[in-house]
Amino acid sequence: MTLLILYSLACLDGLLCGCRTAMGRCPFIGLRSYYARALVRGFVAAQLASLAAWIALSLVFLLTPQRSLLEADLGSAARRMLWIFLPYAAAVLSALALRLLPSTDIRSASSVFLLGPFTAIRPFLMFAGVLFGIYSARLPETRLLGLFVLALMLSIEAILNRLAAHRQSRQIADLVSSERARPAKLEKGM
Amino acid sequence: MTRGGQVLPRPHLLYAFPVVAGYCLVVSLRLLRPVASRPYPLRSAHMFPPSFNAAQPEITDLIVEHDPATLERLAVDKKRVLDTFLAFRNREAMAAVRAIPDRGGFLDARAVDRVMLAVHWEMQRLAEEFFHGQRVYELLKVVLAAIAAMGIKHPLRVVDVGCGIGYAIRWLAARTPLASEGIELVGVDLNDTLIREAARLAAAENLPCRFVHGDAFSARHAGHVYLSTGFVHHFRASNEAGRSDSEALYRLFSRHDLPDTAAFLHYDFRPWALAPLGSWFFHILRMRTAIARHDGVLSTARAYSGAALTAASRSALPLFSSGIYGANIWGTPLPRVFHTLVGMRRNILPAFRAGLGVRAIRLGEMV
């Protein structure tokens, strides 16, 4: 159950990372399909990270001579992590829910005063959550797995951001060179 | 491997995990570092606030120049731009300008265009987050209804002056019935790269609006309603040689006095003590380009107060009533990020007030 909750949180984090890294990189007005693709990219990234974590976990289980002890240790570390991650996820989801209200002031304020600061603390919160989880772990394998998962979590947004930056740079470079080569007909005059 | 009968893990295999975890951490930290996307600065190398000195120009004011008579693009001397920011000891701006490649001492026009597009794509995000389209429509529909009530015949023309890539006009074209009601939606800008992009985006989404490279206040492109976003604060002494701030502002507003022009709505940052700090925090979190971060923060320092805006518009346009709309949030002392300078011919004002309904409380004194 704990693992399932952690997996769900990783998926949610992946979705939001996908959305965040896509923002400000598409200048159209109709952005529904653009953000849908961004969410899918984030979800896929979360699946890859989860797969990597699962492979690492399986390898450790395969190699360790004390499986039952490791299972219990991992379970308690994961439960401790939830003490940090669940309230954070609830706070982020509540801030997102505020954006459903019809007031432009409340929706803007939720972005500036809630979602912005939540984004700012995300890396620190991930450190805090994982460290809180593995701090009292009994086995080194648990600590190492925790650090590995932390690295994966932090990598998701950085990698998605890098990919999106490359895509955007290419698009803009193509736009500028094509405009210079074939100037579009432009209404012009004083 | 056992110790005292207890089975211990095989350490040589576990050594792989610190190595992998360490590698992943290093890769993460490297990726989190600013991506110096050469040859133009898509990322800021600085996390510290730039100078909040409102006397200096924004980077985008200096890296593009057009001949005011012919609108032709002029070559920009990189050293002159750097010297301008050196005078203000603005190292962040200098770093951003230095990152733009040059040819024979003049800024590479293609590189500048790439920067301008990246910055304006990114700035659109700010408009999306602040629901700027909805805010403009909320006021514009009342102004248009008030003008129509005065018997001014269609087609009314709404001109977004200094429209950049035309977010407000494209949003109005896409999301409101204005175009189908016979309102002509036009964006005008002096920057041909941005106006081309606005036209491309509008064509790609098949939007009923058009974009013009030119002077919005010329007789040819005059509008019944002028609107702008983050435009008025560019009319500063630092951008207009030989003029004071108030003279630059007076000159801008006096150009609104055209026979067909009935109203204007100018949205800009509302200056107050914490605005540059708030803007800095917001831009650090949300903006990726060094120039967007720098100019976004400086804009809040350069923005005119409501008193300065109304004083200039009232003296330049004696036939218009003007005032500030939406200075505070819900009648509290809390300032809004943006306020709006609203001006209109005096005969329109009663219908406008009536049209605002409960929102009339947001309207300041109209003189």
Image: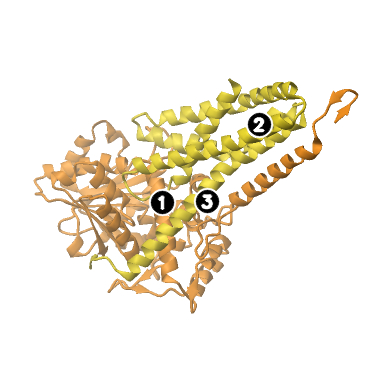
Chain colours: A yellow, B orange
Outermost bottom residue: B104
Secondary structure, mark 2, is helix
* Label of residue B276 in the image: none
Q: Nearer the viewer, mark 3 or mark 2?
A: 2
Left-right relation of B175 to B11: left
- Which of B138/A121 is in front? A121
Quick check: B164 above or below B349?
below
Classify the position of the N terminus of chain B by image quarter. Answer: top right
Where residue A73 appears, x then y in whole percent? 72, 23
Q: Residue at x 41, y 51 (%)?
A: B123
Where residue A116 appears, x then y in whole percent? 50, 39
Chain identifier of the residue bearing label 1 in the image:
B
Chain identifier of the residue bearing label 3 in the image:
A
* Number of other residues with Cα within 10 Å of mark 2, as a class: few under 14, some 14 to 19, many 20 or more: few
The amino acid beneath tag 3 is Arg
Q: Nearer the viewer, mark 2 or mark 1?
A: 2
Q: Residue at x 67, y 22 (%)?
A: A75
Separation of residues labelled 1 and 3 (CA atoms): 19 Å
Q: First in sequence: mark 3 or mark 2? A: 2
The amino acid beneath tag 2 is Ser
Residue occupied by mark 2: A58
Residue occupied by mark 1: B123
The amino acid beneath tag 1 is Met
Q: Are marks 2 and 1 on the same chain?
A: no
Q: Are marks 1 and 3 on the same chain?
A: no
* Label of residue A162 in the image: 3
Q: Nearer the viewer, mark 1 or mark 3?
A: 3
- Which of B358/B204 is in front? B204
Quick check: A138 above or below B150?
above
Quadrant position of residue B62:
bottom left
Separation of residues labelled 3 and 2 (CA atoms): 30 Å
Quadrant position of residue B234:
bottom left
